[in-house]
Image: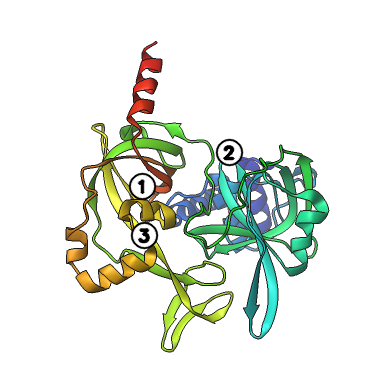
Amino acid sequence: MLSLEELIEEISGKSGKTVDEIRVLIKDKQTELSDLVSEEGAAYIVGRELGVELVRENGNRELKIANVVPDMRNVDIVARISAVFEEKGFERNGKTGTVQSMILADETGTIRLPLWNDEVKLISSIGLRKNNLIKVTGAWSKKDNYKDGTELRLSKRSKIEIVEAGEAPAENEQPHTEGNPGSSRYPQVPSERVLIKDVQEGMNVMIKGCLMQVYKKKPFFEVCSKCGARIKEVENGYICNEHGNVTPLYTLLITGVFDDGSGNIRAVMFRDQAEKLFGMKPEEVKEKYASDGDEFWTAFSNLGKEYMIEGRAKMNDFSKEIEIVANNVSEVNVKEECQRILASLS
């Protein structure tokens, strides 16, 4: 993969702009994207916007997942499969099809790779399964409808090959199900246990904190009943970008502030993680919120409780403060905490 300086030189040479102008454009692009991409990632975006096809050394186009952004072409990555979801059928514009998604992970993050129709056969024909290290070549990227991020798509020229076979899942391991509030949509990469004051952007962290505040806003949103993606309300119902007019399901959302004595941080919890805090199913929350109005949050009884929060730290686009998007929430296990403290003292 080309270094930042090599990328800048190539963009400058092919676009006619000076090196200093390219540096400014890269910095502006990072600012525009709230510093959620590296300088190298911003350089690829700037190059694309200037009509420059960036050729890497020896034809190597491998990127880290953190540097994959929407609207890239000819993307090559090497990543490990952290989840394979069940195959699902769908209907769109009177035609039926199938989709099966995988979550790919490297040391920089995770990304979704959905396989559509005939592409689904790759999973069985190649033998793709959880823990395989794979190489994906010739892919393209787009905005992910499931979350604020990016997903990969295969083109006609794309290839997938297994670089390293992982261990087979245990016989009693259950497959992940997209759109199911009881499953983790994006399985976490290993988390680092830290104090809140030490949380930095891009880290996968585990914190222990007391829930001090909740944001009193609508505690659910509508999702597609076929694919689980967020949907828009229109005059005659709801519409999904993939499946058109659909009947909505409901997914929970709660945003709270946690404090551990060293500092405080905002955490966003979706789906099954939010369900743990509400202690209710999405339909129950929707019904109670509709009947109680502002009193819904007044009756919320979890303030003051301690929780373990695991997730990825990111910069909030509006507040410009670091927050955690949780992928696991649990009550504090006192026995485990005591054992951890004793182990650290010894």
Instruction: Report if residue 319 is visible in the image.
Output: no
User: Which circle's residue, 3 or 2, is located before the other in the chain?
Assistant: 2
Q: Amino acid at mark 3?
A: Leu
Mark 3 residue element: strand
x then y, percent, for residue 173? 62, 45
The quadrant holding residue 319 is: bottom left
- Taking depth in this image into account, of 174 and 132 the one nearest to the observer is 174
Give neighbour class at mark 1: few <14, some 14-19, many 20+ (Cα, 10 Å).
many
**x 38%, y 64%: residue:** 282
Residue that badge 2 annotates? 107
Q: Is residue 28 left or right of residue 63?
A: left
Disc sitting over residue 323 in the figure: 1
Mark 1 residue element: strand
User: Which circle's residue, 3 or 1, is located before the other in the chain?
Assistant: 3
Report if the CB atoms under discs 3 and 2 are less than 8 Å apart.
Answer: no
Instruction: Report if residue 79 is visible in the image.
Output: yes
Residue that badge 3 annotates? 253
Spatial distance from mark 3 to mark 1, Cα to Cα?
A: 15 Å
Report if the CB atoms under discs 1 and 2 are less than 8 Å apart.
Answer: no
In the rendered image, the quadrant that contains the N terminus is top right
User: Which circle's residue, 1 or 2, is located before the other in the chain?
Assistant: 2
**x 63%, y 80%: residue:** 92
**x 55%, y 62%: residue:** 144
Which tag is nearer the camera, tag 3 or tag 2? 3
x then y, percent, for residue 321? 32, 48
Spatial distance from mark 1 to mark 2, Cα to Cα?
A: 20 Å
- Taking depth in this image into account, of 314 and 335 the one nearest to the observer is 335
